[in-house]
């Protein structure tokens, strides 16, 4: 993390963004957060789907009934202001909302929430969106569907403990990531990404009511449809992974990453072309402002460089 942060209405040095060790979120995982891309293109700095990210942030906070001191517009302004302050160009932005109730107050009174926005320079990492190595995935024996309703779709810090635990176990066995199942043995998601399969020229991703609402996921569905490929959101089994022409993961941090193996079994593309590669190229063009068809997804940061 470089430059400044935004914390409770003010821009500060990172060392000034201190919270008490008794903060409820640290002990019980009660923090709503987001990850947002800002890409420096030829015409300036652009935030990718800022409004949708902020909507999801507030929906996650609502699942825990937070009393929020800031509006969506104020959080959006903080994100834009931080990009302007730090001037790093392409960056990954992390807004956070968390309550200041103490750790002895379980489940915690409804205290006023804190808000913070952090950013990390990713200029040197942009090439990885196009040139990432394929992943080897392990289907986890841990169930993901321990949450239901709003909590199943909320992006909350405590929700990711399960992911960290399963991912560390998978990496110890030589895998790059895990895929979780629900109680019906259907695919839900990876540790911090949505799952897609390509079969017969169409793409399928699991039902969204059992997973976090993926913004990159919805972007890929839109792009695939615009390219004329059938899209489906619905149940997906492990056998569907094995039978697929391609499997890939999507997330803000990863972009679109292809999968080479599931449980040690190679995914063999029977087609001459790669739909995942085509989608990746179109997605990169969209986030970089190189495709006018998706210009509504971008929010210009005033005062940035101009080509």
Image: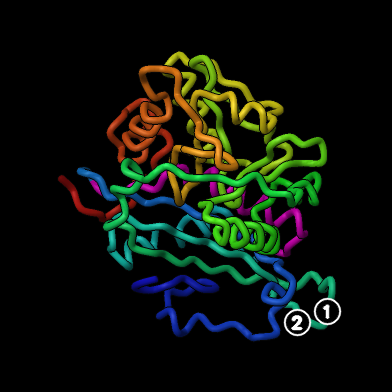
In the picture of the structure, the residue carrying the numbered disc 1 is 105
Q: Quick check: 183 left or right of 193?
A: right
Asked if the magenta segment contains residue 261, the reply would be no
Q: In which quarter of the image is residue 277?
A: top left
Q: In which quarter of the image is the C terminus?
A: top left
Residue 228 in the image: x percent, y percent? Answer: 45, 13
Task: For the residues labelled 2 and 1, say whether their Cβ atoms are less than 8 Å apart.
Answer: yes
**Which element carries disc 1, helix, strand or loop?**
loop
60 to 227, vertically: above or below: below
- Residue in the image at 66% along x and 28% along y: 239
In the picture of the structure, the residue carrying the numbered disc 2 is 102
Residue 279 in the image: x percent, y percent? Answer: 40, 29
Residue 14 in the image: x percent, y percent? Answer: 43, 79
Q: Label 1: few (<14), some or many (≥20) within 10 Å?
A: few
The residue segment tinted magenta is: 44-68
Q: Label 2: few (<14), some or many (≥20) within 10 Å?
A: some
| Mark linked to residue 188 | none
155 to 41, vertically: above or below: below
């Amino acid at each position: 993390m470089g430059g400044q942060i935004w914390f409770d209405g003010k821009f500060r040095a990172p060392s000034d963004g201190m919270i008490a060790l008794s903060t409820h979120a640290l002990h019980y995982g009660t923090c709503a957060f987001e990850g947002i891309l800002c890409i420096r293109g030829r015409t300036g700095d652009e935030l990718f789907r800022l409004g949708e990210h902020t909507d999801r942030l507030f929906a996650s906070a609502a699942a825990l009934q937070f009393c929020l001191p800031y509006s969506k517009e104020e959080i959006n302004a903080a994100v834009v202001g931080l990009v302007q302050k730090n001037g790093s160009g392409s960056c990954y932005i992390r807004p956070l909302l968390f309550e200041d109730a103490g750790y002895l107050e379980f489940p915690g009174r409804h205290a006023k929430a804190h808000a913070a926005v952090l950013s990390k320079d990713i200029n040197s990492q942009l090439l990885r969106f196009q040139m990432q190595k394929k992943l080897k995935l392990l289907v986890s024996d841990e169930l993901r569907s321990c949450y239901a309703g709003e909590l199943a779709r909320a992006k909350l810090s405590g929700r990711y403990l399960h992911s960290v635990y399963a991912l560390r176990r998978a990496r110890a066995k030589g895998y790059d990531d895990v895929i979780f199942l629900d109680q019906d043995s259907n695919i839900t998601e990876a540790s911090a990404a949505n799952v897609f399969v390509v079969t017969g020229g169409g793409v399928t991703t699991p039902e969204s009511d059992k997973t976090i609402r993926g913004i990159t996921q919805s972007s890929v569905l839109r792009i695939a449809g615009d390219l004329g490929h059938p899209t489906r959101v619905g149940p997906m089994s492990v056998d569907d992974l094995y039978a697929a022409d391609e499997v890939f993961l999507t997330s803000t941090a990863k972009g679109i990453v292809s999968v080479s193996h599931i449980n040690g079994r190679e995914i063999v593309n029977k087609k001459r072309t790669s739909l995942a590669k085509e989608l990746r190229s179109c997605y990169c063009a969209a986030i970089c402002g190189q495709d006018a068809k998706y210009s509504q997804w971008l929010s210009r940061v005033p005062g940035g460089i101009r080509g």
